[in-house]
Image (spheres, rainbow, N blue to C red):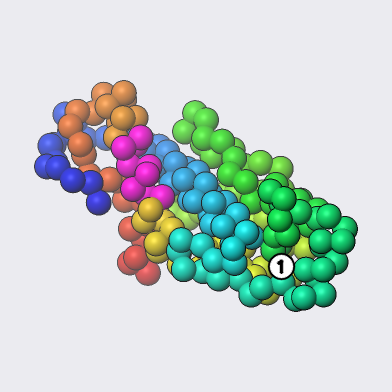
Amino acid sequence: MVVGKRISVSRKPTAKENQDLVLYLNNLVLYHAMKLNYTAFIQKAKTGSDSFGDEWKPLAEKTLKWKQRKKILYSGKVAINIRTRELLQAMKPGYFRNGRYLPPPGQSVEVTTKSISVEIEVPYADAVDAVRPIFVLNLDSLLTEALNKALPLFYNYLRRKGFKGTPPVPPSFLDRMKEE
């Protein structure tokens, strides 16, 4: 994933440091995954498909006309899954501060060293997701791209923490997910 040669770290992290590093990386990957997923959500809302290959079925003609008549528009056009904008707001990525992903209103997350869970707390989110999935279906591609965006920032963090060179990525949920 990262081009270049690896250089050994100046010291091995303690067990506590390793746990903190894994949590930091998992939170950072989650942040980038949510950014990528939001972009994909907007792409599907506007065009029906995204860069990950996911597609939403088009709106029914009746719904399309109703949205036009009621002027329920996004960027001046009728969009799929955007009506009250409550779901759209809940899909937005939160913030990455002090090594933690801070979700926006309407989102609930739990990040551990072994897993990440994200829940959208909009009353109708499950019903929408059943018809048009709100998360990218190709999770491997999404997480790989998110990890590629997160790694340079993670390596900068390691250098600030006193590690030299480019150490291998600590075991994270991505490694465990591939093992299971």
**Residue 142 as seen in the image, left or right of residue 165:** right
Percent across and percent down for residue 96 are 52, 35
- Three-letter amino acid code of the residue under disc 1: Val
Q: Residue at x 27, y 27 (%)?
A: 159
- Residue 108 visible in the picture: no
In the foreground, 42 or 47: 47
Which stretch is magenta?
Answer: 146-154
Q: Secondary structure at mark 1?
A: helix
| Image location of residue 46, percent across then percent down | 62, 59
Task: Tell me which residue sits at (66%, 73%) in the image.
Answer: 58
Locate residue 173: give its quadrant: bottom left
Q: Is residue 161 above or below residue 134?
A: above
Q: Residue at x 21, y 39 (%)?
A: 167
Q: Residue 152 magenta-drawn?
A: yes
Q: How many marks?
A: 1
Residue receiving disc 1: 128
Q: Is residue 158 left or right of residue 88?
A: left
Q: Is residue 169 left or right of residue 3?
A: right
Tell whether position 86 is magenta. no
The quarter of the picture where the C terminus appears is bottom left
**Residue 152 in sight in this render:** yes
Front-most of 154 and 1? Answer: 1
Secondary structure character of the magenta stretch overall: helix
- Does 19 sit above or below residue 82? above
Picture quadrant where residue 103 is located: top right
Pinpoint residue 73: horizontal percent, then vertical percent: 76, 54
Badge 1: residue crowd in 10 Å (few <14, some 14–19, many ≥20): few
Q: Which residue: 58% across, 44% down?
A: 93
